[in-house]
Each structure stands twice: as C-alpha cells, then as structure tokens.
Amino acid sequence: MEQVKGLILAKKDEKLNILFLCTGNSCRSQMAEGWAKMLKSDCIEPFSAGVFPAKVSERVIKVMAEAGIDISNQYSKHLDDLCGIDFDYVITLCDNAAELCPAYPAKTKIIHKPFADPSVMMGDTEIVMNAFRKTRDQIKKFILSLPDSLA
C-alpha cells in the first residue's frame, strides 16, 4: 500500500478492505456492502458489521432487489466476527456506531458518514418503503464516490 496525503491507495492488484459499520448491521451497512460489491468490486473488498447485530431487514432485501442487487445471502455480523481482517477504512454509517467504534491500528482510517435510519420510519407501507429507497439511493451515491471521496 502506498500513502499519499493521508489517503491509502491500493496497488493495482490490491483492493481496499473497507468495513461499513452500523448499529445492527441490518440495514444501512448491508446496503453499503451490497452496493460496494456490485459497483466497486474492482477496487474495494467490502465488509459490514454491527456493534449490536440484528437480523437483516426484509425491507432492505426488497429495496435492494428493486435496484437489481441480491443481498439475500448477506447476514448480520458482530465486529468481533471480523477481528482478523486488516481494514484500510472503517466507515461508520450512524452516530451510535461512531460512538462505539473500537480502536483500530493507526493505518486504519475511520470515517463517519451517517445516513438516516429508515427502520424508524412510521406510516403506511409505501411511506416506510420510500424511506428505505431514499436511504438506499443516498448510500449508492456515496459508494459511487469511493475511493476518491476518502481523501
């Protein structure tokens, strides 16, 4: 790995190991992992985990499928499940995860990029699903900006 102005650059044959961290690893971090696998597999090896993992939301699986991404085989993981992986970046996707994020080696950059939690949305089915779609689309836009936006 080469470091330029604080940005860790992968060599052509290496991918950046990026952990998307959220509270439950049931929604936003699962979306980020799915998008990164689909859109950035040439330069990113994505992982997701939660500080208090819960089951992957069926709504997340549904809205990702609407976008052409099958995450039905992804599952919630605790941070400890990934303890042997050398991450280049840990991206926290909610304030709770940012507060509870453990210490990582100095070379690991920790970035906070919060997104609204659609699972707390109240209302009829369409209102709730639109909240999930909005978060999905915002996360897609963020993933498309990687790795350049990590500088």
Image: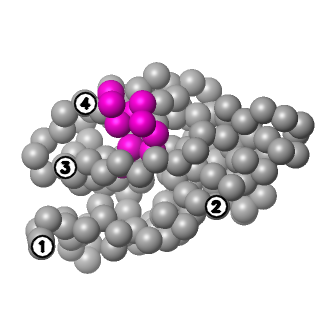
- Chain part drawn in magenta: 91-100
Left or right of 123 on screen, residue 33 = left
- Residue type (three-letter) at the residue carrying disc 3: Thr
Left or right of 116 on screen, residue 47 = left
- Residue type (three-letter) at the residue carrying disc 2: Asp
Q: Earlier in the sequence, mark 1 or mark 2?
A: 1
**Is 97 within the magenta?**
yes
Q: Which residue is mark 1?
A: 4
Quadrant of res 124 = top right
Q: 122 or 42: which is nearer to us?
A: 122
- Asked if residue 73 can be seen in this view, the reply is yes
Q: Which residue is mark 4?
A: 102
The spot of residue 79 in percent (x, y) is 36, 30
The spot of residue 44 in percent (x, y) is 38, 63
Task: Give the residue drawn at x 79%, y 41%.
Answer: 128
- Residue type (three-letter) at the residue carrying disc 4: Pro
Q: 43 or 135: which is nearer to us?
A: 135
Q: Earlier in the sequence, mark 3 or mark 1?
A: 1
| Dominant secondary structure (helix, strand or loop) of the stretch shown in magenta | helix
Q: Which residue is mark 2?
A: 137
Task: Give the residue drawn at x 52%, y 52%.
Answer: 32
The answer to whether the residues at label 3 and label 4 have Cβ atoms under 8 Å apart is no
Numbered mark located on residue 108 in the image: 3
